[in-house]
Amino acid sequence: MMATKSKTVKVRIPATTANCGPGFDSLGIACDIYNILELTLYSENYLHIEISGEGTEYIPTDDKNLVWKVIKDLIDITDAPYKGAYIKMHNAIPLSRGLGSSAAAIAGGLSAANYALNEPLDKNGLLKLATSIEGHPDNVAPAIFGGITISFKDADDIRTFSFLPKLALKMIVTVPQFFLSTKKSRKVLPEKVTLKDAAFNISHVAALTAALCTGNAAVLSYAFADKLHQPYRACLIPGMCEVFTAARQAGALGAAISGAGPSLIAFATENEDLIGQAMVQAFAEHNVDSYYMALNIDNTGVCLI
């Protein structure tokens, strides 16, 4: 029998930042740097993967590739008649830097396969599957839905709410030139926290969300504080506190670890370059080379192009 193939689809997947200070494992934002993924599915047992851009030398091009693994998951779930694929990726999202590179691979692979299979899952179905693979929804939710997302588990379901802030929020991400795996960054976190610290974060993430929804920049200036994860991760990111201070002194409303790090992100409505330069200089004073990117919020999430 002659081998058959699916239609070819191409998707664009945004970078994401998660936690935003107090919103541990629940708050995320889609950012306007993108990976591009092209996919064709084949009925024969054939796999060809091409990669360019960020992380090319580290990403496998065989059946260990994360994008192919999640595509295969969706094929298996839907009993689709495909065993192989042609996958072409161009990555602009830095690898293992706290900007959702693994979430982009998961959301991108699942979404591309879903389009190629004529959309057997809606976005909520994709989110549930992506969360089961990633382990938490804070990055995969904004990657799929775009905007700022608040996500949580509800019994066996994953719920998310996407919105855009009522002010022109800019994100200045300073990327240090070293890797930090999410696994290593999670390993330093305590299994239990005090009631006082839990209450601190609940109040701050509530204030942060309210300030974003109403455009209250004054509240944002103190809403990014956190006591659940950042104090414990500081030992993994040299100069973290000093970079935060430099960002605020240069005009940022606040600053936080981007995801699990090591990138640090400042939030502002102006002076992006001044803030970025100050953060790079603060890192340099701790012998860490870095660069910064001034980003906007992506309001689309993963989409066909």
Image (tube, rainbow, N blue to C red):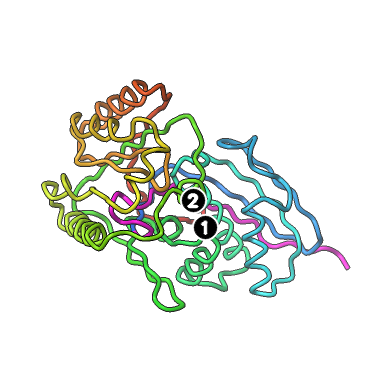
Magenta highlight on residue 7: yes
- Number of marks: 2
Disc 2 packing (10 Å; few <14; some 14–19; many ≥20): many
**Magenta residues, as a range?**
1-26
- Left or right, 160 with respect to 93, comes to left
What amino acid is at disc 2? Ile
Quadrant (top left, top right, bottom left, bottom right) of the N terminus: bottom right
Task: Say what amino acid the circle numbered 1 marks.
Answer: Ala
Front residue of 226/50: it is 226
For label 2, the SS is strand
Q: Is residue 166 left or right of residue 95?
A: left
Q: Residues within 10 Å of mark 1 (few under 14, many from 20)?
A: many
Q: Secondary structure at mark 1?
A: helix
Nearer to us in this view, 95 or 119: 95
| Residue found 44% across the figure and 44% down from its top | 98
The residue that appears at 41% across and 52% down in the rendered structure is 189
Question: Mark 2 sits on what residue?
Answer: 13
Residue underneath mark 1:
107
- What number is the disc on residue 128? none
Residue farthest toward the bottom in the current orientation of the protein: 155
State yes or no: residue 4 in magenta. Answer: yes
User: Could you tell me if the residues under marks 2 and 1 are in contact, i.e. CB atoms within 8 Å?
Assistant: yes
Residue 229 rendering spot, x and y as whole percentages:
35, 50
Tell whether 102 sits left or right of 203: right
* Secondary structure predominantly adopted by residues drawn in magenta: loop
Query: Is 275 left or right of 19, judged from the image as shown?
Result: left
Work out whether mark 2 precedes mark 1 in sequence or the reverse, and give the earlier one. Answer: 2
Q: Residue at x 18, y 30 (%)?
A: 249
Q: Position of residue 288 (x, y in %)?
A: 42, 25
Percent x, y of residue 90: 58, 41
At 11% across and 47% down in the image, what residue appears? 218
The percent position of residue 46, horizontal first and vertical second, equals: 79, 55
